[in-house]
Image: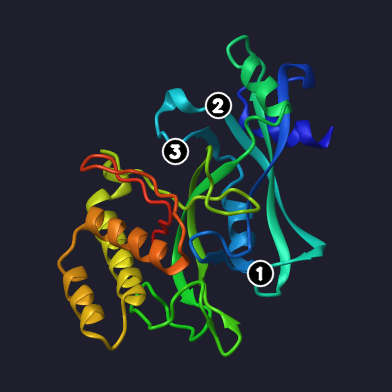
Amino acid sequence: MEKMEKLNRFTRREHSPDEVYLFEVTLCDNDVDRDGEAFSDEALSQMAELFVGKTGIFDHDMKSASQTARIFDTAVVHDENKKTKDGRPYLSLRADAYMIRTDSNADLIREIEGGIKKEVSVSCSAGRRICSVCGTDKTNSACVHVPGQCYDGKLCFTVLDQIQDAYEWSFVAVPAQVNAGVTKHFQKKEDSDMQDDALMKEIETMLRGEVLSLCSGKGAVSKALCLAAQKMDVAELMTMKRTLLEEQHGQAVVQLAGNADSVQLDAFVQR
């Protein structure tokens, strides 16, 4: 059985089909999500390779006790009957995952089969964040275009490209992507290998660029907001971004909470 052969590459001994529970999960897609972001087609192909072997956890809790499943195969799937919000062919990243059947996860398996545990999100790192209107790489500089707005009939959103690493995937209650349930997420932890200090600085730079784009304008209020954003820390920038998006769309924007030791960003992409 081809699936079992691929699965057993990640086990210390060969397992039989009755010892494991197999399920398929849609990790993400190339459509524009609630944060005004979309993975490029190339990014999906890059993640297809990077997510093989990655562990599944709950709510991005990066503790070994949270490990519950593992991906053993992936594929980028084209849905001919569906288009993205801006009219592109719809692609999604599907994954085959497995769990070892135990007494402790019997309830979880029933919840998956019953459609209760369904939505997932991924944690990954992207090298470029491109404005769909002008092509500006927001990892380096900001532009005046606001995600969610249309310019000469063209929808503005941020294209996530050049995926550099995939960390994990999680079962979550409220994902950012409408179709695939993706939350671009990173949780800060004490791990020298993650290079936290440099990474948090990159997050701060990315958020400041997004906030500057959202509050750019010619009025005195916009200029004052831009000046204030230059001095804000990560938590303050997160709050301002959420507020500006709520005012722009006239609706609440789901955001994960954070504190000094544990920062969770609903729209994080590492550069």
Residue 260, x across and y down, in percent: 20, 43
Residue at the farthest left position: 231
Mark 3 is surrounded, within 10 Å at the Cα level, by few (under 14), some (14 to 19) or many (20 or more) other residues, namely: many
Q: Which residue is denoted by mark 2 in the rendering? A: 68
- Give the residue type that dot 3 points to: His
Work out how far the residue at label 1 is from the one at label 2, CA to CA, in angstroms: 33 Å
Point out residue 77 in the picture as x, y percentages from the top left corner.
76, 57
Q: Nearer the viewer, mark 1 or mark 2?
A: 1
Question: Mark 1 Cα within 10 Å, few/some/many (few <14, many 20+)?
Answer: few
- The dot on residue 39 is none
Left or right, residue 45 beside residue 158 = right
Q: Nearer the viewer, residue 236 or 245?
A: 245
Q: Which mark is residue 85?
A: 1
Asked which quadrant contains residue 220, the reply is: bottom left
What is the spatial separation of the Cα atoms under label 3 and label 2, in whole angstroms?
A: 12 Å
* Residue designated by label 3: 60
Q: Secondary structure at mark 2?
A: loop
- Cα separation between marks 1 and 3: 28 Å
Q: Residue at horizontal 59%, vertical 68%?
A: 40
Amino acid under label 2? Answer: Thr
Left or right, residue 215 beside residue 121 = left
In the depicted view, which residue is nearer to us: 179 or 96?
179
Of pointers 1 and 2, the one earlier in the residue sequence: 2
Residue found farthest to the top: 103
Secondary structure under tag 1 reads loop
Q: Are marks 3 and 2 in contact (CB under 8 Å)?
A: no
